[in-house]
Image: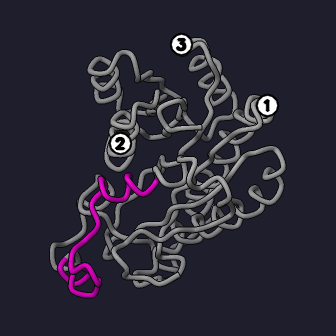
Amino acid sequence: MQIRDQIVLVTGGARGLGLAISQALIAEGAKVAVNYHTSKAQAEQLASAYPEQVFAYQADITDKTQVEALFIAAKTHFGSAITSVVNNALVQFEFNGDARPKIEELNTAIMTRQFDGAVLAALNTTQAALAEMKQASFGRIVNIGTNLVQNPVVPYHDYTAAKAALLAFTRTAAHELGEFGINVNMLSGGLLQQTDASKATPDFVFDLIASSTPLRRVTTPEEFASAIMMFLSPYSRAVTGQNLIVDGGLVKG
């Protein structure tokens, strides 16, 4: 199925990286269900600008009932079910090495908050999409990860552990769902310049990353978003259970 024929849910799709993903999909001609939690004005502005392509809906994706309602509402709006899901939403988090919780400060609440925002949220959207995807013998699920799993240059323990768990879930889900025509992959980035989560990062850190990267620059949200199109396109129909690192070559594999 071509991207222009898909109905794609982008969680957290109204701002930051999520907005870049939504805009890339709009440019490809896809219909986009833009999920938001607090970014109501941004989501409604996007829907107003592209009324034929964008449907904005508020839902806490860690809440299974709200996610199920989101899928029903999107199907009602577009007249057809969601075909693809990009699990992008990030629980409140800032890439600030000085303010990160150290090991001595970690607790169940901190770890669970990130796990719920990454793994539980992806489980909720996957389960909500499953029946329609199986019936269509087609589905694309793209989970957003991080290169910190391979290269934890800054020990964001809670965030990185949750994304590592999401990578494992990506691969187990791909194994189980492949026979139904559902591909599940992960796209992992480094520090993007710039999103709400990275605005607290000092400039010298971006400079250091750029100098260590073969492309000699930091990846932008728009560049990262464009790579997602590969996993949604027909050219990746034999690709599943993979983790593609999109960081300008900083981390290998």
- Residue bounds of the magenta highlight: 207-228
Mark 3 = which residue? Answer: 77
Name the secondary structure under disc 2: helix
> Compared to 31, does 19 lie above or below?
below
The nearer-to-camera label among 2 and 1 is: 2
Question: Seen in the image, is 177 located left or right of residue 214?
Answer: right
Q: Is residue 14 above or below residue 68?
A: below
Which of the two residues, 177 or 2, is positioned nearer the viewer here? 2
User: Which residue is disc 2 drawn over?
Assistant: 24
Residue positioned 29% across, 83% down in the render = 213
Characterize the magenta stretch by its predominant secondary structure: helix
The quarter of the picture where residue 79 lies is top right
Residue 191 sits above or below residue 223 on the image: below
Q: Position of residue 21 (x, y in %)?
A: 39, 45
For badge 2, the amino acid type reads Ala
**Within-10-Å neighbours for mark 2: few <14, some 14–19, many 20+:** some
Q: Could you give the CA–CA distance between mark 1 and mark 3, rounded to whole angstroms?
A: 18 Å
Q: Which residue is mark 1?
A: 131
**Residue ID at (72%, 46%):** 182
| Alpha carbon distance from label 2 to label 3 | 21 Å
Q: Is residue 127 magenta?
A: no
Report the disc number at residue 18: none
